Image (cartoon, helix red, strand yellow):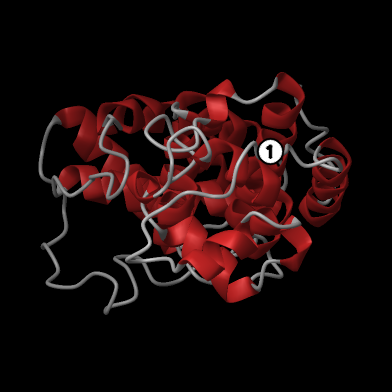
Amino acid sequence: MSEPLALDPYTMWRDALAEVDETFASPPGLDRPVGGCTYCTPESELRVLGGHPADVPDDLLVHFIREVASHWDEDQYPVLWRRFIPRVLRRWGPDGDGTDPSDEMGRLGRRGARLADWPVAEQAAVERALRALLHIAVTDGRPYWEITGLIEGIAHATGDLEPWLDHIARLTGPEADAGVVRLAFGWATELLWEELKFTWWYDGDPQLVAAWLPTLRARIAAFAVRHPRCKNSSDALLALDALEAGTWGPWLYPYDMRALGGPALIYQG
């Protein structure tokens, strides 16, 4: 179900967490002790992981969500994620530790915890929280590569990119407009330089991004009119022109775009 996008994204996040807490209030049970690679996870810690989810220490929880799926019993792995997901979402949220969650999110994908196979109410609650996280990311002023990393992680978790691109396109307000401009310019230049690759999501198709970006042209152009000193918006339009013309674009390839702060450094909207 679509969210009322006019709401403050942090309110949406809190509401989504409340739904997650309610949906997962009775964690699914385990039919036997937790099985896993005892070289990486001692048996004593496996026993703790099988206890009440609230009693698992933070460092052990982080170890679990970062350890590859193949190190756990295949049938138990999704159950463990369902037991821990309220805590994990909070780690990924604005009050978390600030680390990039994209790799961890990928553990929910079809080769891992298989979020797409969870009970409908559980899947819906998790995806609502992910929509709120993406809304916050697009509107809070962070650099574009942090947004794209989050998008990749969410798409990997859910197995699909297009619904999340649609979600971004439906975000409204000046902060969302500025975020879309940053995102469009960042992705467009990566496509021009043939750098757009999904780091963790091996099934991802960058051509979905290439097809989506031109649909933002009118929105970016309107933003450029409202903010004539915004270099991001003018450069985004140049990048779209180059993409559609099949040329390399007007910029020299930087050795380290992030070290330089990105090809377009200033938003003066």
Q: In terms of image quadrants, where is residue 52?
A: bottom right
The image quadrant where one finds the N terminus is: top right
Q: Is residue 226 left or right of residue 39?
A: right
Q: Nearer the viewer, residue 259 or 77?
A: 77
The image quadrant where one finds the C terminus is: bottom right
256 vs 109: above or below: below
Q: In this view, does 142 lie to the left or right of 71?
A: right
Q: Nearer the viewer, residue 30 or 114?
A: 30
- Place of residue 224 in the rendered image (x, y in percent of width and height, measured from the top left): 51, 49
Q: Nearer the viewer, residue 15 or 69?
A: 69
208 vs 112: above or below: above
Can residue 119 be seen by looking at this rendering?
A: yes
- Place of residue 23 in the rendered image (x, y in percent of width and height, measured from the top left): 83, 36
160 vs 125: above or below: above
Identify residue for label 1. 126
Identity of the residue drawn at 55% across and 37% down? 78
Can residue 229 be seen by looking at this rendering?
A: no
Q: Which residue lies furthest to the bottom in this view?
A: 259
Identity of the residue drawn at 14% across and 68% down? 254
Q: Residues within 10 Å of mark 1 (few under 14, many from 20)?
A: many
Identity of the residue drawn at 44% across and 45% down? 107
Q: Nearer the viewer, residue 147 or 54?
A: 54
Identity of the residue drawn at 44% across and 69% down? 42
Total tally of numbered discs in the picture: 1
Q: Which amino acid does label 1 sit on?
A: Val
- Place of residue 45 in the rendered image (x, y in percent of width and height, measured from the top left): 54, 68
Q: Is residue 90 left or right of residue 16?
A: left
66 vs 166: above or below: below
**Element type at marker 1?**
helix
- Place of residue 264 in the rendered image (x, y in percent of width and height, measured from the top left): 35, 66
